[in-house]
Amino acid sequence: MPQLGLLPRRTWVTLLSQLLRPPRAVCISAVGCHSQVAEALLTSQPKPHQEKQNFIIKIPKGTRDLSPQQMVVREKILDMVVSCFKRHGAKSLDTPAFELTEMLTEKYEEHSGLMYDLKDQGGELLSLRYDLTVPFARYLAMNKLKKMKRYQVGKVWRRESPTIVQGRYREFCQCDFDIAGHFDPMIPDAECLKIMCEVLSGLQLGDFLIKVNDRRIVDGMFAVCGVPESKFRAICASMDKLDKMSWRDVRHEMVAKKGLAPEVADRIGEYIQCHGGVSLIEQLFQDPRLSQNKQALEGLGDLKLLFEYLTLFGIAEKICFDLSLARGMDYYTGVIYEAVLLQTPAQAGEEPLNVGSVAAGGRYDELVATFDPKGHKVPCVGLSIGIERIFYIVEQRMKNSFKKVRTTETQVFVATPQKNFLRERLKLIAELWDAGIKAEMLYKNNPKLLTQLHYCENTGIPLVVIIGEQEQKEGVIKLRSVASREEVAIKRENLVAEIQKRLSES
């Protein structure tokens, strides 16, 4: 093909002017180009119908769209959770959806391979946030804050195999509550567990249990069992899979993939079968191996104090000390906890839903210090509510009950039985909007009354105001109840007050 740069200047300008016109055949004869050049230019024009032959409209793996009906349910769940956070005095916070890759990689270690890295767009290597905890710690250090009680709701991204049937996605929403600052032991931790109980009880998901442990006990257990300190975090990550895998499979991963001696894995297996309450804590204080480890004793002491506070809060029966709980995140340093549903309320014909943990969290006293140039510590403890899994449970329950969901909050519909009343409807609906009343009307000049009334019944709008020639002459508006179909005439000046009265009584 001839090089375009060798064409005469006049030819080159003419070609460009032809190409910049609206899409059509390019005139070649006027410029006297070789047939090869003409062919090259013509074939370079985009052919949308050819390019889209194999194009499939779909969403990325591990994501989903949420319909208006689903969003109604989701917003109700979030409103309930956030109202609980606010009841406990939390402030709202938001952070960027992406952070510096280097910052995230250092904090997640074992999980860094699951991060979504972004293409370099201007000298910074960035990744989508993996959770809301690390960005919160970065925010505290960057703003030199020593204490804060905050909540945050936002999306996070993890590049793992999604299991949609269990509410697991690659893009999902987290709902976090955290307490940062130096406080007396276990008081903030106990409040976090109390919040977890309030949220799960309020959502009426069924009976649940919150497992608790302490990273110091886990590390102490590893030490006395003979795990090399360099393998603590790797073995902890394997142990964290016990809610998804059997002990046999986890043991195989520890030994075959992470190089742990079989006898050491077997010692760990003896401990992780233990679960109970304060009596188990007392028993482990006397354990011949664990009682010799300083870290483990500190953790046991704090758990004993924690159970005292949980008893005062009236939630001790919902808490179980479980030595198999590990929590995979590398930044945890103290108490850790995880809530699971014992059973999902099932109607006749339903199958139980296995969604794993629905809330989790723990203490991370050293994370903020990793961002601070001087290494100043700001102890933190928090929790995260598993909104996606909870939403999946509620959604399945609603599907089985065939419950209809209203997708709007419209309270009043403005209708007319006659033609040429658009201006009167517009005036009336503006009056309702200005009074703070949620109102709708059809976007037609002359809609049929039956069509308007059917719309109200189908969408669940409770009240209809009807204006026509007769009402206009008499200075009244008809107010109709959609449910009972009863109509009353209301003086125009009293309409807003009457609607507000009815809405307050419903």
Image (cartoon, rainbow, N blue to C red):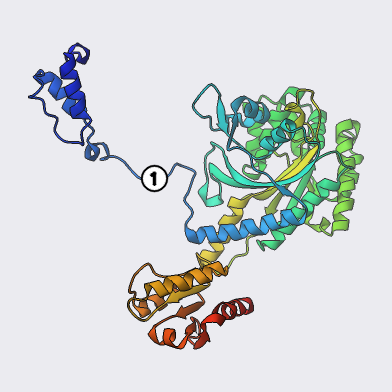
The spot of residue 273 in percent (x, y) is: 76, 44
At 62% from the left edge and 32% from the top edge, which residue is drawn?
Answer: 111
Using a 10 Å C-alpha cutoff, classify the residue at mark 1 as few (fewer than 14 neighbours), some (14 to 19) or many (20 or more): few
- Residue 197's place in the image compared with 54, above or below, is below
Q: Residue at x 59, y 52 (%)?
A: 389
User: To which residue does mark 1 refer?
Assistant: 58
Query: Going by the image, does 501 lie left or right of 187?
Result: left
Q: Position of residue 31 (x, y in %)?
A: 11, 21
Residue nearest the observer in this picture, 24 or 232: 24
Q: Locate residue 202: give its quadrant.
A: bottom right
Q: How far from the left and from the top, in percent, is residue 458?
A: 44, 73
Whether residue 436 is situated above or below residue 102 in the rendered picture: below
Rendered view: 281 above or below 111: below
The picture quadrant where one finds residue 324 is top right
Q: Quadrant of residue 252?
A: top right
Decide which of 233, 244 is in the foreground and name it: 233
Q: In what element is the residue under mark 1?
A: loop
Horizontal arrangement in the rendering, residue 73 relative to residue 418 (left or right): right
Q: Position of residue 138 (x, y in %)?
A: 70, 33
